[in-house]
Image (spheres, coloured by chain):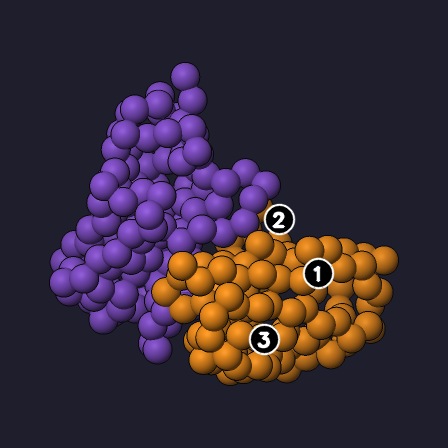
Chain colours: A purple, B orange
Amino acid sequence: QVQLVESGGGLVKPGGSLRLSCAASGFTFSDYYMSWIRQAPGKGLEWVSYISSSSSYTNYADSVKGRFTISRDNAKNSLYLQMNSLRAEDTAVYYCAREGPLKGYFDYWGQGTLVTVSS
Amino acid sequence: DIQMTQSPSTLSASVGDRVTITCRASQSISSWLAWYQQKPGKAPKLLIYKASSLESGVPSRFSGSGSGTEFTLTISSLQPDDFATYYCQQYYGTFGQGTKVEIK
């Protein structure tokens, strides 16, 4: 069965960096676009970034552009999010999600990893 | 950027009720819309894609309709497991702010 397991969250000071990982299993990882989506405490969902199956295309929300970098390693079935210059407003649960076969929507989600940006 | 607006923000209903949630896009998105269910402390779960296609394994009491700028998610007979928050999402982008379905 499809599994997505995030790791790497934690407490970081404003201006700091963090790298999230997502380990995928149960499907051919290299066939699918992947995304990161976040949810601030008590708030709604915000799409953060996507990457195409071969890493040829990436895109970012304006709120993270220039600070976050998405990447993947198809040999390791892994997705990453490098987060730099972190701000208090980046505090959220970060989910990795697989895009559905028709792309643009998300058919499987991980359990999420909490990132807290605070001094 | 396209904005997605859901209504109502909160809905109180009883088991067995028919429930309808509306999602409006600030410009036409054709049928490129998905619906998700989220329970507290859990990841969202896909219910509907391409506005009206039911995801595999999702009960048939859930249905979606609409195109262009106005969309609806309908639960034909609300079950105890359906009390949750529901989000619409335009493909490749914005989510609605969510609709919480509460027990009346």
Near-viewer residue (A9 or A102): A102
Picture quadrant where residue A106 is located: bottom left
Residue type at the position of mark 1: Pro
Q: Which mark is residue B8?
A: 1
Residue type at the position of mark 3: Phe
Question: To which chain does the residue with label 1 belong?
Answer: B
Residue at 62% in and 48% down: B40
Question: To which chain does the residue with label 2 belong?
Answer: B
The residue mark sitting in front, 2 or 1, is 1
Dot 3 crowding, Cα within 10 Å, few <14, some 14–19, many 20+: many
**Distance Cα–Cα, label 3 vs label 2:** 25 Å
Near-viewer residue (B3 or B19): B3
Residue A52 location (% of width, % of height): 22, 64
- Please tell me whether mark 2 sits on a helix, a strand or a loop: loop
- The answer to whether tags 1 and 3 share a subunit is yes
On screen, B4 above or below A94?
Answer: below
**Distance Cα–Cα, label 2 vs label 1:** 19 Å
Q: Quarter holding the N terminus of chain B?
A: bottom left
Residue B49 location (% of width, % of height): 48, 76
Q: Which mark is residue B40?
A: 2
Could you tell me if the residues under marks 2 and 1 are in contact, i.e. CB atoms within 8 Å?
Answer: no
Residue A119 location (% of width, % of height): 41, 17
Residue at 44% in and 33% down: A89
Residue B14 location (% of width, % of height): 84, 65
The residue to which callout 3 is attached is: B71
Q: Is residue A20 visible in the rendered structure shown here? A: yes
On screen, B24 above or below A95?
Answer: below
Residue type at the position of mark 2: Pro
Question: To which chain does the residue with label 3 belong?
Answer: B
Residue at 20% in and 51% down: A71
Q: Quarter holding the C terminus of chain B?
A: bottom right
Mark 1 vs 3, N-terminal side: 1
